[in-house]
Each structure stands twice: as structure tokens, then as C-alpha cells.
Image: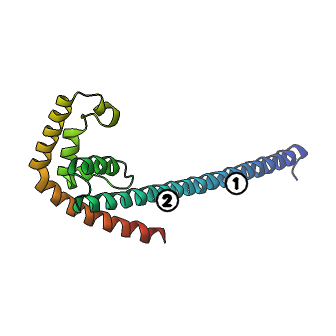
Amino acid sequence: MLSTPWVYLALLGIVIIGVLAAVATKLLRQLNQQKLAQAQAQAAQKQAHKQHDKKIISSVIIIVRAMKEEQCDLAEGCWRLSVLLDSLKLSQDLQLQFPAVFQLYEAIKHMPILAARKELDKKSRMKLDYDRMKLEASLAEDIQRDIELLHQYANEQATVLSNEAV
């Protein structure tokens, strides 16, 4: 027959094992809750990125149409498109897909606009306009090609983003 100290030690061991099992169960539940919360946060962020990109793609389509209909000059359109395309969250390497658009933007982004442009003297403004028009003329054909491709790309992306939202 077991002596009393061994019974107490056995009971103490059972209690310790029970407590450890309860703590382990609690920690596993917390871990699962954290994983679930993290997955939900990632899904919410991905959805927010899709909404952002959907809005940007809509703007891209409007600008591309305006450029095709000559309601927006090439420099302004390339400037706006470059900024918009750089802000897309779910697309990458667009500078490689539409190089002429980004090339014109890179060449003119240093030029002052709005109030800063108004502060320039007439001769400086005319020089900048001349430089910009020369760049537009030299890149016009490539930009028109990029605009066609960009229009197709933007329409495809709009469709994909709309279908994913459903």
C-alpha cells in the first residue's frame, strides 16, 4: 500500500499536469484568435487596396480617354497618369509596360506648375513650353502606343477588380 506522502505527491503531479494543460489550452485559443484577427486584418487591407486601385483605374481610364480625344495634352496626361500609376497598390512594373508615358513625365516633372509657373518671366515660360513641346513631339508616337495599351490594361484591371469585389 502507498504511503500518504506518495499519494499527496501523485495528487500534486495530477494537479500540476491539469494546470499546465489548462494554461496550454488557453494559450492555444489566444494564438488561434490572434491568427484569425491577423487574417481578418490582412483581408481588410487587401480589400482596401482593391478599392483604392479600382478608384485609380477609373481615373486612369478617364485620363486616357481624354488624351485619345485630344482633350488633354500629352504632357499633362503623362504627368497625371504617372502619378496615378505609381500609387497603385496591387500592380507593379508599370514603368516597364508603359515606358514612354513615364519617360515624358521624368523629363518634365522638374518644370514648375501653377503659381510657381506664373512667377516665371515670359521668356522662361516660353523656353519651358518649347522644351516640353519638343519632348511631346519626339515621344508622341510612342506615347500614343502606350496610351492604347494602357487603355486596354486599365479596362482589364477594372473588370478584374469588379469581379473580385463580387
Farthest residue toward the right?
A: 4
Q: Secondary structure at mark 1?
A: helix
Using residue 133 as the reference point, say whether residue 155 is left or right of it. right
Above or below residue 113? Residue 4 is below
The local crowd at label 1, few if under 14, some if 14 to 19, many if 20 or more residues have their Cα within 10 Å, is few
The kind of residue on which mark 2 rests is Gln
The kind of residue on which mark 1 rests is Thr
> Which residue in the structure is indicated by mark 2?
47
Using residue 98 as the reference point, say whether residue 156 is left or right of it. right
Depth check: give the residue in front, 136 or 146: 136
Depth check: give the residue in front, 107 or 95: 107
Residue 158 in the image, given as x and y percentages of width and height: 37, 66
Residue visible at 32% across and 46% down in the picture: 83
Using residue 62 as the reference point, say whether residue 78 is left or right of it. left
Residue 120 in the image, given as x and y percentages of width and height: 25, 28
Query: Disc 2 to disc 1, how far (Cα)?
Result: 33 Å
Q: Nearer the viewer's eye, disc 2 or disc 1?
A: 2
Above or below residue 65? Residue 112 is above
Residue 59 in the image, given as x and y percentages of width and height: 37, 57
Q: Secondary structure at mark 2?
A: helix
Q: Earlier in the sequence, mark 2 or mark 1?
A: 1
> Which residue in the structure is indicated by mark 1?
25
Are the residues flagged by discs 2 and 1 in contact, CB closer than 8 Å? Answer: no
Residue 38 in the image, given as x and y percentages of width and height: 56, 52
Depth check: give the residue in front, 138 or 161: 138
